[in-house]
Image (cartoon, rainbow, N blue to C red):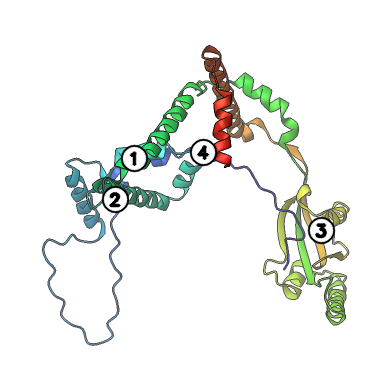
């Protein structure tokens, strides 16, 4: 069933919550070992198993505990959560790395803990590369050292600017938040929504006459079934189309629905069925299952989003003000002639 021609796709702004659970995760939960291999069914007569060396770590929970102890012993402490070669990752380092991520990335880690293992593997790979390049003294090459200086300078400036442009924890207050909410009520309007079901008959406008006639015959048959007493729209949709769910399109906002469809849907009563609607891909018959009236999202619904947006805007303003004041106190002097000559040399 071709659904995309019925409605437009809207992108939703999602502001996830901070992943506090990841930051407070116990050390033992971060250490992982490979799962025990599944037993295989023998294809020939069984062969007596060789005795395992006594030094082998047992599988299962006990094996995990021993693996964790071995990791801890590698560093002489109890905070090593991963190791490859001589590269270790401690719980403290991992927490610091996660806490430096943005709210969106932290929320992704909290939602999918497997991402944490991927993060640790990436950090270990970086450590291995760092060990190799250090051993080769690659970072001491003049051109590499110059690039590192520029990167370090940019990183220091950015970190410092963030420190001087971070709003106070108390911002925004309830009064400021309420004012911004009231000023943006019109933008917080959720449009009217329609729950729709659809029967679709494919009939591209560039199809040949035989295909068009076949589609029209199928459409006439469907309309005849829909006009019968106690007709079951969903059952007909399942029988005549490709929709296993009876053609249920779910809830669609009014501004998501194509204009050709919207004009028909608005005129329907609940459980009403539209006349066939011709679009470029074929014929669409819609049933209105239910309607939700438009409403304005409440402050509790949008509080987190507004707080983050207000803090971001305040930080931007503070950064600009700081830089403007700094340049006012120390006016820059430019050698325009030298700059012009430099550009001429680049153009050649």
Q: Using the rendered image of the protein, determine whether residue 172 is visible from the camera's viewpoint.
A: no
Instruction: Mark 4 or mark 1: name the one nearer the start of the chain.
Output: 4
Secondary structure category for the residue under label 3:
loop
**Which residue is nearer to you in this view: 295 or 259?**
259
Residue annotated with mark 1 = 142
Q: Which residue is rendered at x = 44% and y = 29% of the image?
A: 159
Mark 2 and mark 1: span between their CA atoms?
23 Å
Q: Badge 1, how many Cα within 10 Å: few under 14, some, many 20+?
A: few
Secondary structure category for the residue under label 1:
helix
Q: Which residue is rendered at x = 30% and y = 53% of the image?
A: 32
Residue annotated with mark 3 = 271
Instruction: Mark 3 or mark 4: name the one nearer the start of the chain.
Output: 4
Residue annotated with mark 2 = 128
> Which mark lies nearer to you, 3 or 1?
1
> Which mark lies nearer to you, 4 or 2?
2
Secondary structure category for the residue under label 2:
helix
**Image quarter hosting the N terminus:** bottom right
**For residue 279, which numbered disc appears in the image?**
none
> Which mark lies nearer to you, 3 or 4?
4
Residue annotated with mark 4 = 17
Secondary structure category for the residue under label 4:
loop
């Amino acid at each position: 069933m071709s659904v995309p021609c019925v409605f437009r796709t809207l992108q939703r702004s999602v502001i996830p919550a901070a992943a506090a659970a990841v930051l407070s995760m116990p050390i033992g939960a971060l250490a992982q070992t490979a799962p025990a291999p599944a037993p295989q069914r023998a294809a020939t007569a069984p062969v007596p198993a060789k005795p395992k060396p006594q030094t082998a770590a047992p599988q299962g929970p006990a094996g995990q505990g021993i693996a964790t102890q071995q990791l801890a012993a590698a560093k002489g402490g109890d905070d090593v959560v991963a190791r490859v070669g001589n590269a270790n990752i401690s719980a403290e380092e991992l927490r610091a790395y996660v806490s430096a991520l943005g709210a969106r990335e932290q929320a992704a880690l909290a939602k999918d803990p497997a991402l944490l293992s991927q993060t640790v593997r990436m950090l270990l790979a970086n450590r291995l590369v760092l060990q190799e390049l250090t051993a080769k003294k690659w970072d001491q090459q003049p051109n590499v050292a110059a690039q590192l200086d520029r990167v370090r300078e940019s990183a220091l400036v950015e970190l410092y600017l963030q420190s001087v442009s971070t709003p106070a924890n108390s911002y925004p207050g309830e009064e400021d938040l309420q004012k911004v909410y009231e000023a943006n009520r019109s933008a917080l309007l959720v449009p009217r929504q329609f729950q729709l079901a659809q029967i679709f008959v494919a009939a591209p406008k560039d199809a040949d006459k035989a295909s068009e006639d076949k589609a029209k015959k199928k459409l006439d048959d469907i309309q005849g079934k829909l006009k019968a007493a106690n007709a079951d729209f969903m059952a007909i949709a399942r029988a005549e189309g490709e929709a296993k769910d009876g053609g249920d399109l779910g809830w669609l906002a009014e501004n998501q629905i194509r204009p050709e469809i919207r004009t028909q849907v608005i005129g329907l009563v609940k459980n009403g069925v539209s006349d066939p609607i011709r679009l470029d891909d074929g014929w669409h018959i819609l049933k209105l299952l239910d309607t939700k009236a438009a409403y304005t999202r409440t402050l509790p619904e949008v509080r987190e989003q507004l707080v983050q947006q207000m803090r971001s805007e305040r930080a931007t303003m503070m950064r600009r003000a700081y830089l403007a004041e700094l340049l006012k106190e120390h006016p820059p002097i430019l050698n325009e002639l030298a700059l012009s000559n430099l550009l001429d040399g680049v153009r050649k």
